[in-house]
Amino acid sequence: MGIGYAVNKLIQTIATIFFVLTFNFLLFRILPGNPFALLFRGPGFSRALVNQLNAQFGLDQPLWLQYLKYLQNTLIGNFGISYTYRVPVLSILVPRLLNTVILLLTATAISLVVGIAMGLVSAWRRGGKTDFAFSTSTLLLYSMPTFWLGLILLFVGVIYFGLPVSGMISLNGELTNPFALSSIVDLSRHMVLPCLTLVLGLTGEYVLIMKGALLDVFTEDYMLTAKAKGISNSKLLRDHALRNAALPMTTLIAINIGLAVGGAIQTETIFSWPGIGLLTYQALLTRDYPVLQGCFLVVAIAVILMNFLADLLYGYLDPRIRTG
Amino acid sequence: MSSQLTTSRWRIYRRSWTGLWRKFARNRLGVIGLGLLVFFVLMALFGPFTAPYDPTSSSADILKPPSALHLLGTNEVGQDILSQVLYGAQASLIVGFAAAAISAVVGSLVGLIAGYYQGYAGDLLMRVTDVFLVLPALPLMVVLGAILGPTLFSIVIAIGLVGWTGTARLVRSQTLSVKQLAFVESSRASGARDYYIIFSHVVPNVIPVIFAQTVLVIANSILSAAVLTFLGLGNPSTITWGQMLEFAFTSGAVTSAWWYVMSPGLCIMLVVLSFSLVGYSLDEIFNPRTRKV
């Protein structure tokens, strides 16, 4: 039954997370030249702070003990101290993560709707002019680096539309009530350009997936049967094609979450959107290794969990998977 | 006798090459892609000789729009952008090729072993592949690149070590199907060893698929290299298109000098497009899964 499938996926997910944790541990410790010296002896850290970190992470102890301490610390959210901000990494990560989720969710939702619609039209009128136009623009958008797209939109947005191009809120208008209409309008104005960049960067992939999934469904015998029964085109699409095409969509959307995160790093960097992506960029510039490590860990685990959810959804939607 | 053999073999090769070209020429987009690709390879080879200026010498013409003197304008320290674009082709392409080569080798080895030796070893390899497939690629490359330091070499390693999963899965599925073919079985029945079967039966049948896939991986690698360089992981003294865009962004010239942003970005886009078009076209010819019946 369904339980076996879910448990199986859960075990896989936990194994993957363990792999990431181990990878993270080894990467920042085993590599020549810059092991934990970099992680725990930030420039300008006081002797007392270094001693405290040494004790917390057991740096004078053998590697396997360090590994256990690392797992323990990670589990309770202790990712070390940031070099630049001099505060625990977690306290920087959490608000940034929230900002990224706001941006990514909005952009993904929009590009999903647009992508599904475009893929549908492309598949239905396969070989037609619209299909050609969609396929070409998809291919061109796919070949563009997302950050370049962002740079162009930044230029156009600032010169021709006077849109804000930096941050989430205007600095002059002090934020009194985040739920007031004026703050929401302000936030939306700030979101236009980064969101548009992400949507343009992501939609192409969804169009291709949707078109491919639908074309596969169109060749199935039951589609011919349904057509022969004489049901209307819209009903054929809605009840037969879309339902079956939704299955491969769920897994592929999950795989694309990783891609979306990559796009977010570039977009946030260009529009100074204070999320995890911008934090990664800033940590790279200042060589703030604890923050960099924390960003990677949080993003990787988030993506792994989203994949787990997508697997569960897939199992729920397709009974063949659950029992098989 | 031996010369006769080589002649006939040469004929077979020549026939298969012309046959391949005939199939390839049928796909208009693939041919367009190949044309673009040849253009950029020529640019990488001869760009430095055709550049009108020394790309590193600065002048008093700061952020000047395109003119007869500077066809693509100048940057924030007065360097000629056309010369930089021409010089930048080389490193941009080499990074893509090198990273894709690493991906091809790692992916093929993992795929061959996982496909040929089904059992614990194969299972374990596929699990590792699945883990890499789930992990977000760009953050992984960023972390690897940051640890290895800001050089072109570390960018190559970071991209190569992340981009092999697609190839591995493809090679594995191809190996599985080749393994079941009758002639492989009869070869095994007549006492052929594993390495003989792998290298004289499996590999020759899988290589075309690896080739098509690797052309696509080159496209992705060039794109990733540009992104990593833009995020500050490149070597600032090597001219690449990604590096030019990084300077355009960090110097704050993006909001005033469109010519500074357009030309390197267009080059990246077109070169990625060319490899993608050629790759898809080859994939259609070589990969039975995507071949149209």
Image (cartoon, coloured by chain):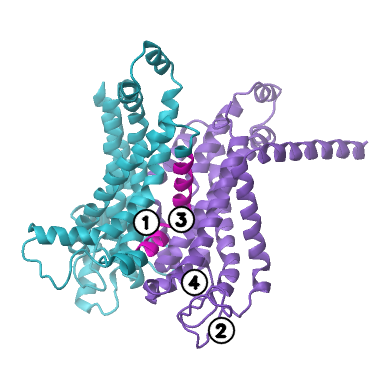
Chain colours: A cyan, B purple
Quarter of the image with the N terminus of chain B is top right
Kindly indicate whether the residue at mark 2 contacts the one at mark 4 (C-beta within 8 angstroms). Answer: no
Residue that label 1 marks:
B139
The mark nearer the N terminus, 4 or 2, is 2
Q: Which mark is residue B235?
A: 4
Q: Nearer the viewer, mark 4 or mark 3?
A: 3
What chain is tagged by disc 1? B
Give the extent of the magenta segment.
A132-153
Query: Which residue, as the protein is rendered here, is positioned at the far right?
Result: B1
Give coordinates of residue A174: x percent, y percent: 10, 70
Q: Nearer the viewer, residue A129 or B265?
A: A129
Marks 1 and 3 share the same chain: no
**Residue type at the position of mark 4:** Asn
**Which residue occupies 30% across, 40% down?**
A113
Q: Position of residue A233 (x, y in %)?
A: 35, 22
Query: Which residue is identified by label 3?
Result: A144
> For the residue labelled by badge 1, is the local secondary structure a helix, a strand or a loop?
helix
Horizontally, is B218 left or right of A232 in the view?
right
